[in-house]
Amino acid sequence: MTVWKKVLALTMSGILVFGMSACKGKEPEGDEIEIEVAEEPEEAGESGEPEETIEVVSDLEASISWWTYPVFVQDEGQEEGAYEQTLIQEFNKKYPNIRVELKMLDYTQGPDEVQALIDGEGLELPNVLLDEPGRIGIYAKEGVLTDLTSMFTEEMAADVVSEGILSACRNEGAYVMYPFSASNYVMAFNRSMIEGSGAIELMNREGACTWTTEAFEQVLERLGNSQFNGGILYCSGIAGDYASRSFLTNLYDGSLMNEDGTAYTMNSEANQQALTKVKEWMDKGWVLNGSGSTGADAVSSFVNGDNSFCLLWSLPQALANAQALQENGVEVVVMPYPSEDGVPELEYMLKGFCIFKTEDEKQEEASRYLVDFLCNDESKAAENVVRSGGFPVRTSMGDVYGGNEEALLYEALLPYSGTYYNHVEGFEEMRVYWYQMLAEILNGEYSVKESTDSFVEYANKTLEPKGEEE
């Protein structure tokens, strides 16, 4: 939390500038920012300060509920939900007759609480929920979500940074989630080690820093020749599996699934080549066998300064470990996962809003007003994104972190966001098979072909709708 306060303080000036130019996603011409100045001074209120002029957008009368996980960072000393309440107050200046009831969920019990309402009869669901595509996709399959396609105007869809993010918002052709903020998963290197080995000379440090598998292999060789420990390819537990999938499937431009998401493709020639190459690197000591290590173990080991790189990294990881990194003298260099053609398809964290179906048309309209306000309001949208720990999914928002170098890299990587797999049927079960496959290969229990064929066989079974005979 303390780290975030520093980030927010450093970027607040950038947020205020954005607030004057965002105008619901409209991009200002050139570098100019137009600020409308009143010809006559505003009348002073009783306090002597000019009264704030807010235009009422709608006088619609309705009562709606907004449920959210603790996504937004609170001001220092404020309780959970305090910032969300200020957003409701700002919303009510423009929509004074819409009453919004806020409920904070926790990540442990929240998903079960929502699912229980869906499974129950006659129980009232929230109107608006801020969540992630995996769970929202499950709710969509239950048939309880409103079709938000009308909110995805041609202009808005063209403004979203990648088709991958748009696809994550769809279920069976309809948009069921309105995207809010995102951040890619990346890998991290220990600066002193890549500089000490000369490996940094082989790493692209411009723009999105994309690079090839060939260059990555050369980096591994230099690190190994300088006796620096490689990174851990962990495959114990479940957490962090998205990073290992992104790393492996990108190496030779493979993919986890086919284009229509109906079958897994880890036994493709490209993916078998990637796994064979990784086993080769492991035998040379350039990548460490993590069959007994979790993603958390890999992060901890890297933060302690024991490894030259870590496959599991993101902005939240950097923030959570900032103090430990400083204490251990580890400076991080962030890189995307390498790919054969130098154009990666990255997995990512994505947050967005869904609206649950209701027969009350006024509640439906009010819910859309709230979602639009939280994502697009010219005075709050940028700060909302920063407080969510992510980056804008809309190109027109521009730089909301005030030119911070590391933040600019994350923003530059968003257009490389690939297909979002988490909402396919049986995804959680597939994740167990994923780590079993990796452990078998790293430990030499089975060949790459045998393990990938077995993975595909069992993973494909998870795609069958629940209750269907196998």
Image (cartoon, rainbow, N blue to C red):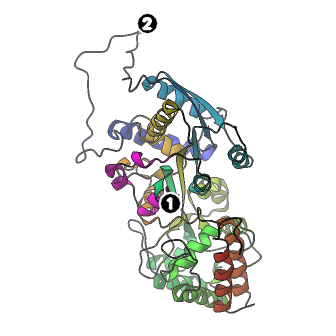
- Please indicate whether residue 324 sits to the left or right of residue 344 in the image: right
Mark 2 against mark 1, which lies toward the viewer? 1
Q: Is residue 359 above or below residue 233?
A: above
Q: Amino acid at mark 2?
A: Glu
Q: Nearer the viewer, residue 201 or 285?
A: 285
Residue 36 image-quadrant placement: top left
Identify the element where label 2 is drawn. Answer: loop
Q: What residue is shown at x 47% (from left), y 80% (from top)?
A: 253
In magenta segment, residue 122: no
Expressed as whole percent of the image width and height from the top left, the position of residue 116 reads: 73, 46
Quick one: label 2 or label 1, which is nearer the N terminus? Answer: 2
Q: Does residue 288 appear in the picture of this structure?
A: no
Kind of residue at badge 1: Glu
- Would residue 41 be found to the left or right of residue 238 on screen? left
Numbered label attached to residue 46:
2
Q: Which residues are magenta?
A: 144-172
Task: Please state, as top left, top right, bottom left or bottom right, where the C terminus lies in the image.
Answer: bottom right
Q: Say if residue 53 shows up in the picture.
A: yes
Q: Looking at the picture, tell me which residue is in the foreground, 192 or 416.
A: 416
> Which disc number belongs to residue 172?
1
Q: Is residue 424 left or right of residue 154?
A: right
Q: Residues within 10 Å of mark 1 (few under 14, many from 20)?
A: few
Q: Which mark is residue 238?
A: none
Name the spot of residue 188 as percent of width and height, x first: 56, 68
Q: Nearer the viewer, residue 339 or 465?
A: 465
- Look at the numbered disc 1 and give the secondary structure of its residue: loop
Residue density around tag 2, few if under 14, some if 14–19, many if 20 or more, within 10 Å: few
Mark 2–mark 1 Cα distance, whole angstroms, equals: 56 Å
The picture quadrant where one finds residue 122 is top right
| Horizontal and vertical percent position of residue 237 | 75, 69
